[in-house]
Image: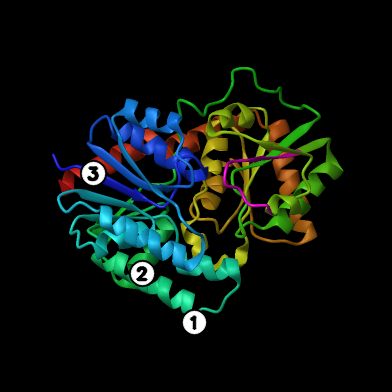
Amino acid sequence: MKPIQYLTFDSIQEGVGSSQVFSYLKRLSSSWDIELVNFEKKIEVSDIQKMQSLGINWRPLKFGNFGFFGGFKRIIALRRQVKSDAIIHGRGDFSALAAILAGSQRVIWDCRAITPEQRIAQKRKHRFSLEYVVLRAIEYICAKKSRKIIVITERACEFLMQRYRLPKSKFLHVSTCVELERFKPLVNQKPIGYDSLNIAFIGTLGEHYDIELMNRIVSEFKSKTKTKFSIALSKGSTTLYSLMDYDELVHLSHDEIPEFINSQDIGIAVWREDMGASLLSAAATKNAEFLACGKPIIVNISQGDIGRLVLKYKAGVATSDISDVAVNRYVEECLSLVKSDPSVSKRCVELAHRHYSLENGTNEISKLYSKLA
């Protein structure tokens, strides 16, 4: 059996590294010889011991500097670590590029975002800026030279197939998943019709979120019922949270998130609608975690597949308009769900189990490894 070399720029101590990378690898390591190569600002002994106990060969590299040259050096450093006899799972454009530059013929491009569009939308740059041209070139190389492509939304699959004229057989759809055995509803939930309301945003608050609209929605909730808005930040978070009208700010490890979500009533994570094509590949972990705990969510309709799924399952609200009338309607719909609909929690859990199960996701990835091996 060929070894699997998992390459990523993500730290396993921060954000998606702790919630996604580590969760996937600890399951895959029971069936595959996994070597993780990533970048860390600081190496914790507890993380080394955790990896060793799971049988994962962890080779953390020094993160280095931020910026363009820092990123370029990381690509070169990762390229030097690529093993010619391994199946390479490159998480993100730059990791896959490093493996392709090393000459590997067994590269899986784990496409986490439509990066060129996301970067220019976040920085509000022109489509023909140098950065956009470079990122499009990298995306092209990854699309054409990789053996398989993992996408986190069906909409991203359709977009990349059309953009680069690729066959659907090259793609595998595995959404951002959640550990259902850890994220699940508590037995003692609030009774229907309660007076107070807890709303929360968890994770990293980036430039792609519509902070203004989320503030307006929270304000509308507060005008209708007693409401507490909390922000739960993970390691590596930005300072954009200072722009949010929150009542409570907490810093939590990933292990503490399930209990926190179960103390909430609604999760909110609305992206900016002007993010263009990058919205097609949006699949935030936090959405799946709230749903798995039986909590409805507020997202925007253009956010990957989740907006349409939320409407289909009646598991929250998907915004499409920013007018005052629309904001009032979203809040009324949410209040109706959490205060008057006894089956909303069941529908949320059903959505999570059908579309965001980590067990199902890792099984699909394992099958892909077997095909390439």
Q: Nearer the viewer, mark 3 or mark 1?
A: 3
Q: Which residue is tagged 1?
A: 128
Q: Which mark is residue 4?
A: 3
Magenta stretch contains residue 264: no
Q: Which mark is residue 138?
A: 2
Q: Is residue 343 above or below residue 351?
A: above
Quadrant showing the C terminus: top left
Tell me where residue 324 appears, x and y as whole percent.
79, 59
Q: Is residue 163 above or below residue 174?
A: below
At mark 1, the secondary structure is: loop
Q: CA distance from mark 3 to mark 2?
A: 23 Å
Magenta stretch?
229-239
Q: Indicate left or right for 303 with 46 as reference.
A: right
At 55% from the left edge and 42% from the top edge, which residue is drawn?
286
Mark 2 residue type: Ile
Q: Is residue 229 visible?
A: yes
Dot 1 or dot 2: first in sequence order is 1
Q: Indicate left or right for 306 with 105 as reference.
A: right
Q: Give the image quarter of residue 141.
A: bottom left
Mark 3 residue type: Ile
Dot 3 or dot 2: first in sequence order is 3
Closest to the observer: 21 or 316? 21
Mark 1 residue type: Phe
Closest to the observer: 136 or 364? 136
Q: CA distance from mark 1 to mark 2?
A: 15 Å
